[in-house]
Image (spheres, rainbow, N blue to C red):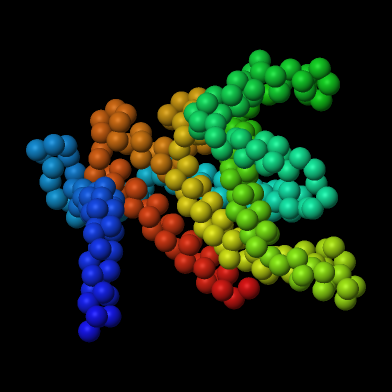
Amino acid sequence: MRRVFLSKKYSRWGWFFVGPAAILIFVLSFYPMVQAFILSLQSGLGNNLRFTGTRNYLRLLQDTVFHSSVANVFIYLIFQVPLMLFLALILASILNSPKLKGKVIFRTIIFLPCAVALVSSAIIFKSFFSLDGIVNLVLLRLKLIPDPISWLTDPFWAKVVIILVITWRWTGYNTIFYLAGLQNIDTSVYEAARIDGASGPQQFFKITLPLLRPVILLTTIMSTNGTLQLFDEVKAISPGSGFKATITISYHIYNLSFYNSPQLGYAAAVSYTILLMVAVLSLIQIKVGDRI
């Protein structure tokens, strides 16, 4: 009886500690999600809201700006996420080497971009890649280009700049995850492999990658989620709100909500497409990760 009583007592105290956080999550996250879904089925503003059903979702099929934003997001996703995770894995392997001296300094340097404000880093890169910026100046001095490149207004190069900004900022963040995973691998596994005659590449592909699979899956899902919601870098670097070459889904939602005539119902419908994409891609990645 005493054990049952203590179990109930601890359960009550557990709910006492979890309750406030659960209430805040519901009020600040789940309730706004439900309200946004209801809003996505309406049109108008303020007291003039009217129920329009799935009209906002059907409008997505005809919205060329939305189509451009989805295409841009998947371009960033396909090129930037694998590049970033590959660089993070290489840097983590180097930092995990027992022969490396000054590990603390190198770890700080690699993680430092994550501590820089998003807007600040984007503005710095914008100045670097401006028409009279340092990148064009160096390329002209080296005679690699005949004329300055319009990095920020050219559809192709603008995407390249944004990919560079995202990679520079978030590679160190993912490196920390991989480094933690590498440090949890027992060194005796590598010693046994070396005794059996396994080379460095064989150890990496046969031991390191399989044992890091949960961490790789986690970083892939987080990076995918972040890329689908990309906003700050594009907002700070793009030359204008109508620049379709770099616009993302979140940036399109921002324009719909705060520019010209606000279309909050349609913006809510667009936001739910991000939720759907994140859910579908995360499910695919989990399924693929379980089979590898």
Q: Position of residue 254 (x, y in %)?
A: 36, 36
Viewed as shown, does residue 287 lie left or right of 30? right
x, y (%) of residue 13? Answer: 25, 63
Residue under the point 58% across and 45% down: 173
**Residue closest to the eye, 247 or 176:** 176
Which residue is found at the position 42% from the left and 29% from the top?
241
Left or right of 234 on screen, residue 262: left
- The foreground one among 204 and 138 is 204
Location of residue 269 in the rendering, given as x and y in whole percent from the top left corner: 30, 49
Q: Eyeballing the image, is 145 above or below 277?
A: above
Relative depth, front residue between 122 and 41: 122
The image quarter in which residue 102 lies: top right
* Residue furthest left in the image: 47
User: Toward which corner of the image does residue 257 lie, by quadrant?
Assistant: top left
- Residue 213, above or below 101: below
Residue in view at x 23 percent, y 74 percent = 8
Q: Position of residue 4 (x, y in %)?
A: 25, 80
- Residue 159 can be seen, yes or no: no
* Residue at 53 percent of width and 65 percent of height: 285
Compared to residue 246, the image places residue 132 above or below, namely above
